[in-house]
Amino acid sequence: MTTDDPRTTDGPGTTDGTDSPAGTIADAESSGGHEAQPSDRPVTVFLVDDHALFRAGAKAELQSISDEIRIVGEAGSVGEAVAGITRMRPQVVLLDVHMPDGGGAEVLRRLRGELPDVVFLALSVSDAAEDVIAVIRAGARGYVTKTISSTELVQAIVRVADGDAVFSPRLAGFVLDAFAERPGAEPISDPELDQLTPRERDVLRLLARGYAYKEIASELFISVKTVETHVSSVLRKTQLSNRYELSRWATDRRLV
């Protein structure tokens, strides 16, 4: 996004500039296919990015051009984001994809189950397919690049808050290829999933479907001890801690 004409704010939700009507998103698409309508109240937004200068510029500019959103908090790391989002409970989180301590996917992994009503919109300099797919699989509702204009970003925020899925046009194709499984579509790699062996995927798939260890062993013609070994390996590779988290992880990746 551009910050050529930043204007100062007096605090969240206040401006000293003149509000301008938000326009139609020209370089972002949504699955809903309709234009966002003005909300009765501002959409509360939490901004996550590891660059303090970008956060300051984005906060000032976004709030100066529209009264449809209100920035209620910001964070520059995964830990700060998890604590701040949990405390503030915003409607929408603008989420950077790459941060030194884990990035957007890690924030989603920690919060998605705890805060199901919070919507996450990825905002990144990266337009790489693997980044887009990883964060969408983790639970983000949309993904736009930082080349988006400020007015268009406001509209994207409002649209995801209203239930739309919003993507920059080129990125939408990645998502369709990965999730719609169109004939001839080039498969998108998932580094976390790719590290599992075929047998570990088989065990995980049955585990996520609710099978007991004994039932998995019978289904795959292996011993219960071997099942336990595979589950331990999957837990280690995914850095998860229990069966519930594994089931949710597998569901997110459509293994079930």
Image (spheres, rainbow, N blue to C red):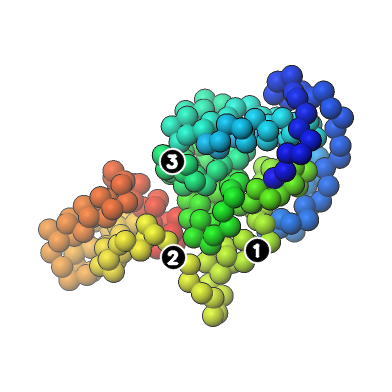
At label 1, the amino acid type is: Arg
**Separation of residues labelled 3 and 2 (CA atoms):** 22 Å
Which residue: 29% across, 69% down?
198
Question: How packed is label 1: few (under 14 Cα within 10 Å), some, or many (20 or more)?
Answer: some
Q: Single out the residue that lies furthest toward the top.
A: 10
Tell me residue 256's x, y (percent): 40, 62
* Picture coordinates of residue 18, whole percent (x, y): 87, 30
**Nearer-the-camera pick, 91 or 222:** 91
Q: Earlier in the sequence, mark 2 or mark 1?
A: 1
Which of the two discs, 3 and 1, labels the residue nearer the N terminus?
A: 3
Residue 140, image x, y percentages: 55, 49
Residue with the mark numbered 3: 100
From the image, tell me which residue sits under label 2.
189
Distance from the alpha carbon under mark 2 to that under mark 1: 17 Å
Residue 159: x, y in percent? 71, 47
Q: Secondary structure at mark 1?
A: helix
Q: Residue at x 66, y 53 (%)?
A: 166
Q: Which secondary structure lies at badge 2?
A: loop
| N-terminal-most mark, 3 or 2 | 3
Q: Amino acid at mark 2?
A: Ser
Residue 242 occupies quadrant: top left
Task: Establish if 156 lies above or below 88.
Answer: below
The disc label shown at residue 76, or none? none
Q: Quadrant of residue 253?
A: bottom left
Mark whose residue sits in front, 3 or 1: 3
Residue 42, can we see it? no
Question: From mark 3 to mark 1, how far is it between C-alphas?
Answer: 26 Å
The residue at which mark 1 appears reads as 170
Could you tell me which secondary element the residue under label 3 belongs to? loop
